[in-house]
Amino acid sequence: MPLHRGHHEQAQVALVLFCVGPYRTALEARHVLAMTDHPMAPRTANAQTLLYEGGDHDSPPNRWLTLRDAQAASDNNSTWQLGVSGDITLQQLPANTLYPLPKLLLSRRFSTALCGLTFVQQQLVLLLDARKLNP
């Protein structure tokens, strides 16, 4: 994760936060190229279907995050869109508040994109690796 640091500040990481099912999640902002109200890329995926095993998937996405396609490394212009519901926020968090997953959670995670966790206003936030999200 790229770190941003002022003269006397600690390193900061820019994150895009959104909900997936009952969970608050975040991606590094550097992977999010744009946000739109309607899908426009040839490849799309609903974040709730992609990342959350349980519950109903009847809330359709109301925002679409445009991400670089890590699977198409040869084509730098290839993108896809991740559909999310609810509020989307951009936040800078201190790098020392981002934690890797504990070994037990790492071995039992549903998606390889789940890579860590943090807390925002005393709420657990699951950190996702955008390069490992697969539509």
Image (cartoon, helix red, strand yellow):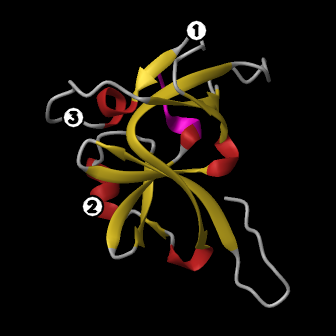
Discs 3/1, front: 1
Residue 86 place in picture, x, y as percent: 37, 42
Which corner quadrant holds the N terminus?
bottom right
User: Would you call the spot at circle 3 few (<14 residues within 10 Å), some (14-19), or many (20 or more)?
Assistant: few
Q: Badge 2: few (under 14), some or many (20 or more) residues near its Cα, within 10 Å?
A: few
Q: How dense is the environment of label 1, judged by Cα within 10 Å: few (below 14), some, or many (20 and up)?
A: few
Q: Residue furthest left?
A: 55
State the mark number for residue 103.
none
Q: Earlier in the sequence, mark 1 or mark 2?
A: 1
| Residue type at tag 2 | Leu
The answer to whether residue 102 of the structure is visible from this angle is no
Assign a secondary structure to mark 3.
loop
Q: Is residue 27 above or below residue 49?
A: below
The kind of residue on which mark 3 rests is Glu
Residue wearing tag 1: 42
Query: Horizontal placement of 31 versus 8: left or right?
Result: left
Reading the image, the residue beneath label 3 is 53
Q: Quadrant of residue 130?
A: top right
Tell me: 48 left or right of 88: left
The alpha-carbon separation of the residues under discs 1 and 2 comes to 36 Å
**Quarter of the image holding residue 91?**
bottom right
Q: Are marks 3 and 1 in contact (CB under 8 Å)?
A: no
To which residue does mark 2 refer? 104
Residue 110 position within the rendered picture, expressed as x and y whole percent measured from the top left: 29, 40
Q: Residue at x 70, y 47 (%)?
A: 30
As measured in the structure, the alpha-carbon distance from the residue carrying label 2 to the one carrying label 3 is 18 Å
Residue type at mark 1? Answer: Pro
User: Which mark sits nearer the N-terminus, 2 or 3?
Assistant: 3
Provide the secondary structure element on which disc 1 rests.
loop
The magenta-colored residue range is 131-135
Q: Position of residue 69 (x, y in %)?
A: 64, 25
